[in-house]
Image (spheres, rainbow, N blue to C red):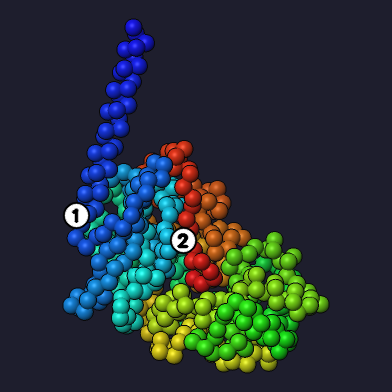
């Protein structure tokens, strides 16, 4: 009798337990649908979470709302309405078919996550597109409206994060709307306040890794350029078999080849480590061996019309506001042919080439140095994009460098004392206890928000 009673009570308890989440789920969906301009595109329920793909109506130009609107994609990973919210700005587009994943800050605070597709990437592009509307302020204002809309649901603290260009995006949002979030964790975010003064990059390449590795990479670049005619022929054959073209961006296979060679050492250090130096081919390598290694590291398919299409909004932003690395390439003097190639306007279609305005980056740099609060910067010691860094103020803001790390630097890769300090700072800002690391939460993959290929 007692066992039957206990079994009955267990069934009732289970039914009651399941009834509450169901009601909460309906309430969440209703509250999302009630937000003006927000559309729920789809929903899935990974273990322990609810995952929504959303679309939000944004003005094409926030200063002139009458110019029209566009739909900006975002995703929501929901854990609890009272948990911290991590605003993840990747700086690029979301995957075509987004799936649930968690950034490092989301994992550390055990929170919700809102991931935003940057305006002008993928489907988040106005039609017709006025590229003058692609500015750091316009995107920051997109994010400001999203935060305001979702704060009607989420009562916890907000932390913004991003990697590389996404980290830059998080800094710009913080600069223009400092009250939106309670702290920022920006990973490997380049800072280029005065574009012509880019000697920091040359200094980086003069000392990164070992002298032997640096020499080997320089020799690969020189050797490839010395074999230009044969290497370009290999590229043209590769392009023919893969359907690559060059007409809209670089203009020729020769310019595309040279751009890839200029980028080879950068690409190596961005995503490889010093342990990979042993793979660098010697000067005695055959044309095919040299081509294959450079292709694996820097991708000859990237500097083609097809490879660059997705990244054109980035290059436009770099040309107009963000700036770009300006390297001297002294070791290649006499071997290059195309002047002013290694810059954004060198790869943009003619109609998108623009004059650079230095004022936005000077303004942001000054604000971060003097007025910013609760900003945490993570850089990689061997990452080229970490050569020019933001300098945070002393207002509860911090900068850490992961030894030997590349563009995938993270809090987890910091030395133990720095890792503990950075984690404690993030948890304090989020008013969160250390993550409970639920078994079901561990099933979600990590998301460092790096783009599909080598850019910021």
On residue 408, the disc is none
**Mark 2 in CB contact with mark 1 (< 8 angstroms):** no
Please indicate whether residue 66 sits to the left or right of residue 312 in the image.
Answer: left
Question: Measured from the top left, where is residue 107 in percent x and y?
Answer: 44, 48
* Residue that badge 1 annotates: 34
At 41% across and 42% down in the image, what residue appears? 47
Q: Which is closer to the viewer, label 2 or label 1? A: 1
At 26% across and 34% down in the image, what residue appears? 20
At 25% across and 76% down in the image, what residue appears? 61
Ranked by sequence position, the earlier of labels 2 and 1 is 1
* Residue that badge 2 annotates: 449
Question: Measured from the top left, where is residue 43 in percent x and y?
Answer: 34, 51
Q: Nearer the viewer, residue 293 or 413?
A: 293
| 301 over 161 or under it: above or below | below
Q: Secondary structure at mark 2?
A: loop
Query: Dividing the picture into quarters, in which one does residue 63 lie?
Result: bottom left
């Amino acid at each position: 009798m007692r066992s039957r009673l206990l079994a009955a009570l267990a069934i009732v308890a289970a039914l009651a337990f399941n009834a509450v989440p169901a009601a909460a789920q309906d309430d969440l969906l209703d509250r999302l649908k009630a937000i003006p301009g927000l559309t729920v595109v789809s929903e899935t329920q990974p273990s322990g979470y609810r995952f929504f793909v959303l679309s939000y109506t944004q003005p094409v130009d926030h200063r002139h709302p009458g110019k029209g609107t566009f739909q900006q994609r975002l995703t929501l990973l929901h854990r609890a309405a009272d948990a911290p919210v991590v605003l993840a700005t990747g700086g690029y587009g979301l995957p075509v078919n987004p799936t649930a994943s968690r950034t490092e800050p989301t994992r550390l605070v055990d929170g919700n996550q809102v991931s935003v597709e940057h305006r002008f990437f993928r489907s988040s592009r106005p039609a017709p597109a006025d590229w003058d509307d692609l500015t750091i302020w316009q995107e920051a204002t997109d994010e400001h409206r999203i935060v305001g809309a979702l704060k009607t649901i989420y009562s916890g603290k907000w932390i913004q994060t991003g990697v590389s260009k996404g980290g830059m995006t998080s800094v710009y949002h913080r600069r223009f709307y400092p009250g939106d979030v309670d702290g920022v964790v920006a990973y490997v975010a380049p800072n280029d306040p005065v574009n012509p003064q880019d000697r920091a990059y040359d200094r980086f390449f003069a000392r990164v890794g070992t002298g032997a590795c640096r020499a080997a990479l320089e020799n690969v670049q020189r050797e490839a350029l010395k074999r230009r005619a044969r290497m370009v022929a290999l590229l043209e054959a590769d392009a023919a078999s893969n359907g690559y073209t060059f007409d809209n961006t670089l203009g020729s296979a020769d310019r595309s080849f040279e751009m890839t060679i200029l980028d080879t050492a950068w690409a190596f250090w961005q995503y490889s480590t010093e342990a990979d130096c042993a793979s660098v081919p010697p000067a005695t390598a055959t044309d095919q061996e040299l081509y294959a290694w450079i292709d694996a590291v820097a991708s000859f398919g990237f500097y083609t019309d097809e490879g660059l299409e997705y990244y054109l909004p980035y290059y436009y932003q770099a040309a107009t506001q963000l700036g770009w690395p300006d390297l001297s390439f002294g070791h290649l003097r006499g071997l290059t042919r195309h002047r002013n190639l290694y810059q954004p306007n060198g790869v943009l279609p003619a109609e998108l080439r623009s004059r650079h305005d230095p004022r936005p980056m000077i303004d942001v740099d000054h604000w971060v140095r003097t007025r910013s609060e609760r900003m945490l910067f993570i850089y990689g010691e061997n990452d080229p994009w970490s050569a020019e860094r933001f300098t945070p103020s002393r207002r509860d803001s911090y900068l850490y460098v992961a030894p030997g790390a590349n563009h995938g630097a993270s809090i987890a890769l910091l030395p133990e004392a720095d890792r503990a300090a950075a984690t404690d700072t993030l948890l304090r800002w989020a008013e969160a206890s250390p993550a409970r690391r639920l078994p079901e939460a561990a099933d979600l993959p990590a998301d460092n928000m790096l783009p599909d290929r080598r850019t910021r």
